[in-house]
Amino acid sequence: MTKILVVCGAGVATAAVVARKLRSYLAGEGITASVRQGKIMDLLSADIDADLIISTVPLPDDLGLPVLDGVPLLTGGAAADEALSTVRDSIARAA
Amino acid sequence: MTEPAHPSAATADPVTLLADLCVARLEATDRFDVLRTLGASAVRAGYARPSFVDALVERERTYPTALPTPIPVALPHTDPAFVTAPGLILATLAHPIPFGVMGTASGAADVPLVALLLMHDGDDHVDLVADLIDLLGREPVAASLCAAPDRPSLVATARTVLGVTA
């Protein structure tokens, strides 16, 4: 199962909101994936237990994992739909 | 994504707007000045610890919070450890002030509307915050809040367009 880690600065505000939208979208699409929210500090640990990271904060380039911008999922509209499609495609690739 | 117009109205526990702490047409020199003014009022009113203000400023510097919506809205917040009671403080700015765009290291947006989130730990606030962000990101909602000439009008408008209690 694809493991998605959603991160923001504190792990309690924007990451939680993005994770909620993502879970609801994936459930609607019938896609099984694990969605976990965390804070940016979680990414400094030696091994990150995730296949895909979605972030509302800028991240270093050298994480060695695919990173998607989570801000469109907060703002909604067409950009959010596009971001959700990108996530779906990334999950399909990771599977 | 389509959401109901007033999703928070459907939940049992709407966001509490801290009406006395809201400010219409706030005069400020920069984004940190805005945060210090609003943060200090939250501390004085007993909603946050004294260390909240510095934490808020530092968080904004490191992880900017402006949403790049048609009318940019900044959502300053910080670690729940600094918050003693949850709530929302709204401020409109006398002149739009540049804030960093969320998710970017260098992007900036001229922000006329600030929603300071005082959050407790735990998941119970997530639906409320999500609904609030959905609504604030909509141009007519943000525009109606920005048009309020004074605090009573801002608070009354927020009750109507955001479904908050005050």
Image (cartoon, rainbow, N blue to C red):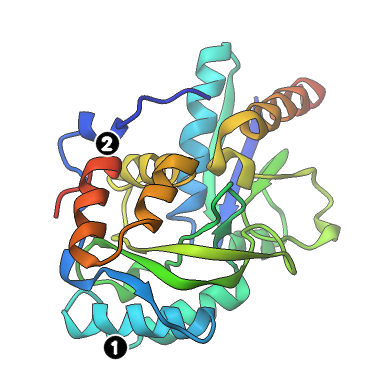
Q: Nearer the viewer, residue B101 or A16?
A: B101
Q: CA distance from mark 1 to mark 2?
A: 30 Å
Q: Position of residue A65 (x, y in %)?
A: 80, 46
* Amino acid on which disc 1 is placed: Pro
Badge 1 marks a residue whose secondary structure is loop
Report the number of discs: 2
Q: Nearer the viewer, residue A51 or B31?
A: B31
Residue linked to disc 2: B8
Residue that appears at 55% across and 56% down: B72
Tell me the quarter of the image containing the C terminus of chain B.
bottom left
Q: Residues within 10 Å of mark 2 (few under 14, many from 20)?
A: many
* Mark earlier in primary sequence (1, 2): 2
Residue that appears at 29% across and 41% down: B161
Badge 2 marks a residue whose secondary structure is helix
Against A15, is A39 above or below? below
Q: Nearer the viewer, residue A78 or A6?
A: A78
Numbered label attached to residue B68: none
Residue that sits furthest to the top in the current view: A30
Against B88, is B140 above or below? above
Residue linked to disc 1: B50
Q: Position of residue A35 (x, y in %)?
A: 55, 35
* Amino acid on which disc 2 is placed: Ser
Mark 1 chain: B
Residue that appears at 38% across and 84% down: B53
Closest to the camera, between mark 1 and mark 2, is 2
Mark 2 chain: B
The answer to which image quadrant residue B50 occupies is bottom left
